[in-house]
Image (cartoon, coloured by chain):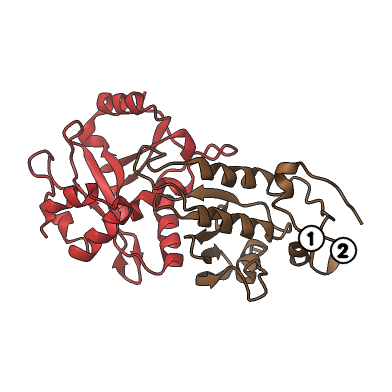
Chain colours: A brown, B red
């Protein structure tokens, strides 16, 4: 079992319970809440950028963008926390109307998960060899306060290009 | 509500809902066919005109130096400002870049933007919203707002209609 201590500023983003789905069958969580699983550098930059969104004000882009909804930032951080390390870390964006989104732009393969601060998310994902994915008003938290990365988006992000 | 009311709607609060209000009051991009700012604009935006979307540093991916989808999200909020290149001219473009400290612009044809469709419906309208210090100013406004997953797709298609890497006008 690898137990490491990331910098304190990242520690609050991590919790033992939320990593079971990330590592899946390859990881058995053993214990108390002070055990922190090393995710190396995964998502560190994204998390830092998301945290910086809390400091933005209305019209932060000088084009009239609303400041990101704080709840949307928190929800994006939560989704980042449960994003499988099998896929590259997403990039964040603060949309003009105050929504916050995580996105993966890999050319023909693209995925985006958006948050409006309502505790739900929406998602769009497309790759050349799969049907596009459209998800709307999906609760971010289950009844037992757990969150899961959308499997349909994961499938798009890990799909292989068709052989030619 | 008339087409000439569009500039005022786009400046009214809440600006994040301005394009949605335009789409509700004046649906199906009907106002593309007449000037919405007849006292300042050189005329409606033609399909063959080139639209420049200026880019700030915060709209660039640090790794790839390509524009991010965020740059296009204003089309779903208060209107995405663009400059009509042929109407503005080279010098005006350069001045705009210097004044606002942009790093450059990406471009598309007006026709490519207007041709974007969702379930057969035009998804973005282009209006000749000239302003006093820029008669070549125009706005791209989203015309469909639900569901949000489809809005994400529309924003992506709008991004793909534009060039990827900004070029400098200076």
Chain on which label 1 sits: A
At x 50% / y 38%, what residue is drawn? Answer: B60
Nearest the eye: B46 or A133 = A133
**Residue B27 in sight here:** no
Badge 2 vs badge 1, beta-carbon distance below 8 Å: yes
Q: Position of residue B10 (x, y in %)?
A: 23, 50
At x 68% / y 49%, what residue is drawn? Answer: A43
List the residue tagged with mark 1.
A16
Compared to residue A101, the image places residue A132 above or below, namely below
Quadrant of res A74: bottom right
List the residue tagged with mark 2.
A31
Nearest the eye: A14 or A25 = A14
Q: CA distance from mark 2 to mark 1?
A: 8 Å
Total numbered labels: 2
Q: Position of residue B133 (x, y in %)?
A: 19, 30
**Residue B77 in sight here:** yes
Q: Residues within 10 Å of mark 2 (few under 14, many from 20)?
A: few
Considering only order in the chain, which callout, 1 or 2, is on the residue closer to the N terminus?
A: 1
């Amino acid at each position: 079992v690898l137990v490491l201590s990331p910098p304190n500023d990242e520690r609050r983003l991590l919790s033992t319970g939320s990593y079971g789905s990330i590592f899946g069958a390859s990881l058995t969580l053993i214990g108390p809440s002070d055990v922190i699983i090393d995710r190396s550098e995964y998502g560190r930059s994204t998390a830092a950028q998301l945290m910086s969104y809390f400091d933005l004000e209305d019209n932060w882009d000088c084009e009239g963008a609303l400041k990101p909804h704080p709840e949307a930032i928190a929800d994006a951080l939560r989704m980042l926390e449960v994003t499988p390390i099998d896929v590259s870390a997403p990039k964040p964006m603060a949309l003009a109307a105050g929504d916050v989104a995580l996105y993966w732009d890999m050319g023909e393969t693209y995925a985006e998960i958006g948050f409006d601060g309502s505790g739900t998310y929406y998602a769009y994902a497309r790759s050349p060899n799969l049907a596009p994915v459209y998800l709307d008003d999906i609760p971010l938290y289950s009844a037992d306060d757990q969150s899961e990365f959308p499997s349909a988006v994961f499938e798009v992000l890990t799909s292989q290009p068709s052989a030619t | 509500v008339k087409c000439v009311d569009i500039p005022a709607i786009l400046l009214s609060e809440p600006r994040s809902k301005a394009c949605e209000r335009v789409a509700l009051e004046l649906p199906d991009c009907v106002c593309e066919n007449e000037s919405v700012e007849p006292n300042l604009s050189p005329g409606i935006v033609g399909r063959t005109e080139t639209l420049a979307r200026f880019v700030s540093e915060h709209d660039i991916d640090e790794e790839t130096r390509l524009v991010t989808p965020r740059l296009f999200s204003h089309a779903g909020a208060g209107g995405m400002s663009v400059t009509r290149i042929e109407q503005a001219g080279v010098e005006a473009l350069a001045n705009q870049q210097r004044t606002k400290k942009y790093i450059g612009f990406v471009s598309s044809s007006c026709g490519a933007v207007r041709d974007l469709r969702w379930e057969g419906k035009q998804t973005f309208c282009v209006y000749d919203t000239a302003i006093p210090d820029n008669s070549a100013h125009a706005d791209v406004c989203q015309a469909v707002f639900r569901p949000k997953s489809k809005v994400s797709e529309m924003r992506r298609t709008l991004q793909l209609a534009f060039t990827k890497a900004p070029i400098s006008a200076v």
